[in-house]
Every structure is written in C-alpha cells, then in structure tokens.
Image (cartoon, helix red, strand yellow):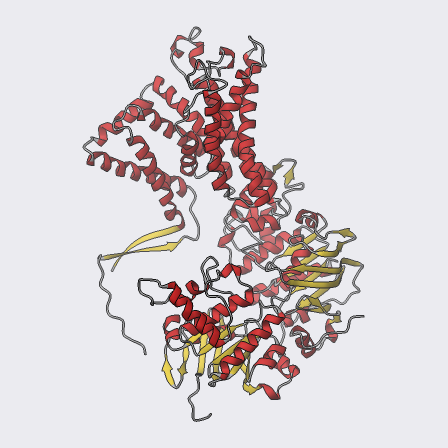
Amino acid sequence: MSDQPLAVEMRGIVKRFPGIVANDEVDFDLRRGEVHALLGENGAGKSTLMNILAGLYQADAGAVNVRGQAMAFGSPRDAIEAGLGMIHQHFTLVPSLTVTENILLGLREPRFRLDLARIDGKVGELAGQTGLAVDPRAKIWQLSVGEQQRVEILKMLYRGATILIMDEPTAVLAPQEIDELFGTLRGMTARGDSIIFISHKLDEVLSIADRITVMRRGKVTAAGVPAAGMTKRELAQLMVGRELLETVDKVVHEPGPPVLQLSGVSATSDRGLTALDDVVLQVRSGEILGLAGVAGNGQSELAEVITGLRPCSGSITVNGRDLANRPVVEAIDAGVAHIPEDRTGTGSAPNLSLTDNLIMKSYRTAPVGHGWTIDGVVARRRAEELKDAYQVAAPSVDTEARLLSGGNLQRLILAREISSEPGLMVAVQPTRGLDVGAIETVHRLLLEQRDRGTAILLISEDLDEILMLADRVVVIYEGHISEPIAADEADIAELGLLMTGSARSPRP
Amino acid sequence: MSAVAPPRRHLLPFAVHAERRLETPRGLGLVTTIAAVIVALLISALLIWLIGGDPISAYAHIVRASLGSVGVLSDTLVKATPLIFTGLACSVAFRMRLWNIGAEGQLMMGAWGASAIVLVGWLPEGTPALVYIPLMMVAGMAAGALWAGIAGWLKARLNVNEIITTLMLVYIAVKWVQFWVFGPWSEGGFQMSERFPREAWLPRLTDYSDVLPDLGGLTVHLGFVFAVIAALLVWYLLSRTRKGYEIRLIGDNPRAARYAGIDIGRTIILVMLISGALAGLAGATEISGAVHRLQDNFSPGYGFTGIIVAFLARFNPIGVVVAAIAFGALILAGREIQPAGIPAMIQGIILFCVIASDVFLRYRVRVVRR
C-alpha cells in the first residue's frame, strides 16, 4: 500500500488562539481504506486539527496534502469538493424536511426544478449500496438519533466524500446503534473510503480503529500507532498523562457527617436516554468529592437532579431533607449552592445588572427581600460588598452582566453562591474556559469553602484539577458511578480506564 | 490552490461600519426614540407631500386639533386613557417576553364585564356611584384577567403559543359583545345597549361646571387618573417588588430564572392575569367614562394600538403615559385629516422607525471613507 498516496497528510500544523496553542507542530496522516482514531481529552486539540482539515479554520503554519496534492482550503466547500466530509457531534439537519431535502441543502444541483421523486430514488440507491438503511421520504424529526446520523453520513457520500471525519459519533448513540454504526464504517473502508474517528472512549477506539493518534494539550503523544498492539492502560496514560501541577495548600482534616446522600438515583437525558443509572453517592461536610468523567456521561444530569432542575427516581437528601423531585426553591432553602456548567446560559441574566444577578438566590429573604418588595438600597450595598470582596472587575454594580469576562462572571457566580453560606455546593466545570489567574481564584475559594465545613461536589473533566482539590474521587461513566477512592491513593491510569469504561470497580 | 481575489469595486466612496456596543450609555434609549419619531415624521411628511398635501399645514392641523386648546387637550386625554391601560397591559407582559397581543379582546371583555354590572339589573335603581363604579371596575378587571388567563394557562400548562391564543380570543370577545348588544341587551333593536344611569358614569370635569364654569365641555374623566395611578403601580411592581424582579429575570433568561428557583408557569399565569386586568380596565373605563353604554365597535383598536404604545415606550410604564397621549392626539386629529388614513399611516411609520432604531442601541455605527 506504500506506493499509494496517503488520503490525508498533515505536517507541522500550528494553530494559535488567544492565550493558547491549540495545535503545536502536529503531524497526522490517514491511509486509504483505514479507520484512524484521534484520541484525546477535551481541549487536547483534536477538534481544532479536524476543523483545519475540513476548511473551517486556517492553520497558522503547516501543510495539508489530500491524495498527494497540496491543499489550502478557504472554506468547508473547498474541502467538500476535495472529497472531505466532516460529521459534527451536533447534527446539522432541518427537522421538518425530508431526508432527501436535507441531503440537497446547500448543493448547487439541481439548479431550479426540484424533481424530488427522482432524487429520492438516487438517495435510496445510495443508501442501499452503503448499507445506510433510511427512508429518503421520511422527515428528520421522525427518525431516531442513529438514523439521523446515517442521514449525515449519506449527505457527505452524496457530495462525493471519500474521506469522512466523524467527531465523537458515538456520544449520542445507544449501544446497539453504535454496533450498527461500526458495521457501516467497516463496509465503507472495505470499499476504499477512509475515516477519521474522533473519540475519547478507549473501548470503541480499540474495536474500530486500525491506527491511533493520541493528542494531549495540543501535541501528539502517539502518532499513528497500530491499534492491534495497544492496551487500554497505555492509551489512558498517553491521553491523560502527568503534568506539573499548580500547588495548593490543602489542610488535612477529618470530614464531618454526610450532607448529601443519593441512593438508587436514575434519570434520563433530554433525549430520553438513560443518563443516570442507580447512582449511590455521599458527600460529607468539609470534604470535596471529585467526580471525574468524560463529558456527556451524566454529569450535567447529576447536578440537575440534586439542584431540583431535573426529575429523577430514587432518593436525594441534603442534611436529612428529601429533595428528589422537589422544586428548585426547596434546594436553595436547604442550602444547596450551584455553580452551573453554563455560566452565561444558566448562571446569569446577561442584560440585567450585577446587582440583579447577585441577588438571584437571596431576593426572597431578608435583608434583601421584604415581604412583597425588594429593598433596593440593601441589594445594592450587598452587591457592592460582594463585588469588592470577590474582585469582580466592572465599572459599577449597574453594569450589565454580559459585559463581564468569563473569569469575572465566574467570580460573580461564586460570590453569589458562597455568600448564601451553603451546606452543599455543586460545582460543575467551575474552571472551564478560564485563564490561569481565574482558575487559581476558583480553586482557592472552593478550598476555603471546604475548610469552613461545606460539602462540595466538584464535577470536572480536568483530572488534574480533581486530584489537586478533591479528598475523594469517584468516576462517572455512562451514568454509573464508581466506588470512591481517596485522592492521594488514586492512580491516574486506573482513573483513565474508569473514565473510558474499560474497567468497572466492583460494587459491594 | 490559492487564487488571487479580484479587486472589489466599491459603489460608494465610504463604508458603514457597525460595531457591537459594549455598553449602552444612559439616556441613549430616550434620545434614539425621539430621533426615530422625528425621522418618522419626516418620512410621513414626504408621503403627504407626494400625494399632493402640505405636510407643514397638516402637522400644524394635527397639533391644533389635538393639543391646541384646553378643550381638545381634554379630548386627547380621553383617547389616551384606554391607550395607557392597554399600553401597560402589553408592557407588563412584553417585559417577560410574553407576547399578549390580544389586549383588544381583554378590553372587550372588560367592557362587557363592567356593563353586566349595570345591565343585568341586580342593583336596585338609585344605587349610588360609590357602589356602581368600584363594582364596574372590579368586574372589568376580572373579565379581562379571566380572558387573558385562558391564554396564560394554556401557555403555562401546555406550552400553547400565546401569540395565537390571545389573538384568536380577540375575535371571540368581539363576537361575544356583539351577541349581547344585538340580542339580550339590545335597545330597541339597535346594536347597542340602553344608556347607563348617571350613577354608573365615571365623573368628568364637565360634571362640575355648575361650580366652576370653566370646566364646561371638558369630557376628560376619572379613568385618566386611574390610568396614571395604574402606570405608577406597574412601575412599582416591575422595579421594586419581588414579582417584578422575577418578571425581568424570566424576560432576560428563563433558564437563569428556573435556576434561581422561580416557578415560570405560575408567573406566566400571574402576569397574564395582571395584563388582562389592565386591558379590562381600559374597556371598563372607556364604557363607564366616555361611551356610557355597551355598543358594537366602541374601540377603534385601542388594544392593538397599545402594542405600538408599549414598544414606543420601550415597555417603560411612565413612557407608556407619554406615548399614549401622543397616540391619543393622533387618533383625535385623525377625525379631521383628509385622507383619513394619514394618522394611521403616521402611527405605522413611527412604530417602524422606533423598532428599527433599536439597532443604534446595540451597535455603534460609523461612516468611514475608503
């Protein structure tokens, strides 16, 4: 096969974003007829690299060859014309249109008259040849997620793509749909198409990939190694690695009585799939329990059931008070603080003032709330105090929240949540997207809370962060939570395996 | 593969750059609104000129016919009264991005409710005004609130689009009033009820002309005072109370509101009830203060004009009073301007310009030379 040109060859790719180097001298190649897995944590630079290949980003340096020819894609259209198709994790389909109509979207043909019946036939033929069974006349909203993904693949094949880039294609699929997808992919490579498979699930990567490239913090840690010779443990090590850590002073002390107790908690995601499956969890006063895991394994849903935002089955108590399926306001009353994953979408009201944002949890009770009314003078004074104490950089407390930087907005949210003197704090990805200084502030504030006796559930994808802050660590994978491990005894490779579903700790 | 782009030809010697504003300066909203109204009046002037009219004398006539003397000013305030109520009804809902566009129907039901107090005949003859008026106002509010509450309940429980339901309920309310004025309450077969007894009239300035002769002919009634009080109360509700805070929070980010523990469904119903009650008062005060009987077509679309008033005021309750008086003047002058469509056209152009001017609040627009 060595005489054949590589399907894709990327050399010395560099891509910088403000503050970070997302791709640092990255090499990557894809042979004809292979599945090449690109493995790495969130933020490792996989998506950036693939977006460069698909024409969505321009590389700052480096060269891209497709089938031996140098390419400089200016737009996704150029990439599609060169036979490259990217399938994103979030589908780009119009729910009210049919399969065929979706496939035609954005194409230059047909020019004017839309002979849908004829094109339905063409699409059906293509679907039959490739084993992507789907009814061309079905409307997208009628299709399962797995079928919608087939439409996305068909869309690319219809455009003549022979190189497919699939960004975490299994993230939204049920297990049997994953098997079907793998069958389809094998059929495609047998016909000579090439596939880049982005994932961070080791089992899947080892079962579908011919070769594996691992990325970590913008660099390649394993370049195109054959999958056959690899073990999950090796991959986990390559993917998670060890880094010099920011050091924090963690006072050792005995945790107090349990504050949060979950038993037998199950819940479904927005899509109706099982997100939490019989979860048992306990967080004690004065400890940080770190919940590690790859995004989308039920972390968001766990935070939502505890804070009352999502219905569930099972029992959730905070200081003995039953909170399962109770309104959010009861969780607030019970002293549950919540640092939400989505700072702008959930944690703040962008067009309201800092004052209005800072009283979101306290406006019901004295001294801010007064029966029916809100004491504007007290609210303002409190807001000013919090703004100073937490160093929220803004001209005044009348400034609209949308004008704050990510770090300042997070400081505002922490100020609000910590000032409620919570018994339990649920912190979801509290440092994602923040710069180093802001990250240190958030870490310091969380540790201060712990030392004051708050029970903290720290949900993070950053394993280093969890190992640095947490007293005990659990891992969530597909809605299951592992047995807790003391943070200082945790083995990073072992955690990596748990995070990728390759090992399951025994349950008593 | 990189191709050299051909040099672009420019049509104009300058370019317009729009940059997102980071901060909206205080008072810019008011300045922009006034500028938008001026631009709208200039566009309208052009159109009047194009159809062969004299824009200056037309505008002078509008001002004279609506604000030129105490008498016409009083008439303007009469027209403004229902507009203040419907403008408030829309503002309080729109603040929450709850699009109650059916204030017209709630106004109809409010008028019907107030009329029912008189026309059902439960109250004996000679019942004093102190009993009549409060009962009529409460009945009007209740009927309007109930009507909007239907749409609120459907939205909160079944997520039915309130734009559709509130609008459809307008047609039902119109037919409902028609049924009563053509049928049970018809006076001698005319499509109107009998005249209400004097005790069911809201006091007017002219009613005191025997004490102060200067007040003779001034038909502005107590409803205007009610409307101004209502504006102050709505302002207080929105800016000083817990509910008002919740309304603003839901309006800006419903997910944050849910996260803050607010029951959005309940708030939707409550705000619809408040909005409907305000629109109901528009009908009750109009019937009791100006029309003095229930009749078909007593509202020239006060409920719909209230939407424009609310937007013109940028949902600010105090601004609603100002905008409503301006629109009251336009409606009043409309009776004397030919062709009769001119004031409606001006209204439309004003709304268009005010909404379009929002872009200047969000963007800083600069003209640069190439």
Q: Position of residue B253 (x, y in %)?
A: 54, 49
The residue lying at 35 percent from left, 54 percent from top is B18
Q: Is residue A168 above or below residue B122?
A: below
Front residue (pair A391, B331):
B331
Residue A487 occupies quadrant: bottom right
Q: Is residue B251 above or below residue B141?
A: below
Residue B47 occupies quadrant: top left
> In this view, which residue lies farthest toward the left?
B52
The residue lying at 69 percent from left, 60 percent from top is A448
The residue lying at 44 percent from left, 73 percent from top is A125
Asked whether, in this view, residue A319 is left or right of residue A446, the answer is right
Front residue (pair B206, A388):
B206
Front residue (pair A383, B300):
B300
Q: Quadrant of the C terminus of chain A?
A: bottom right
> In this view, which residue lies farthest toward the top?
B210
Asked whether, in this view, residue A342 is left or right of residue B217, the answer is right
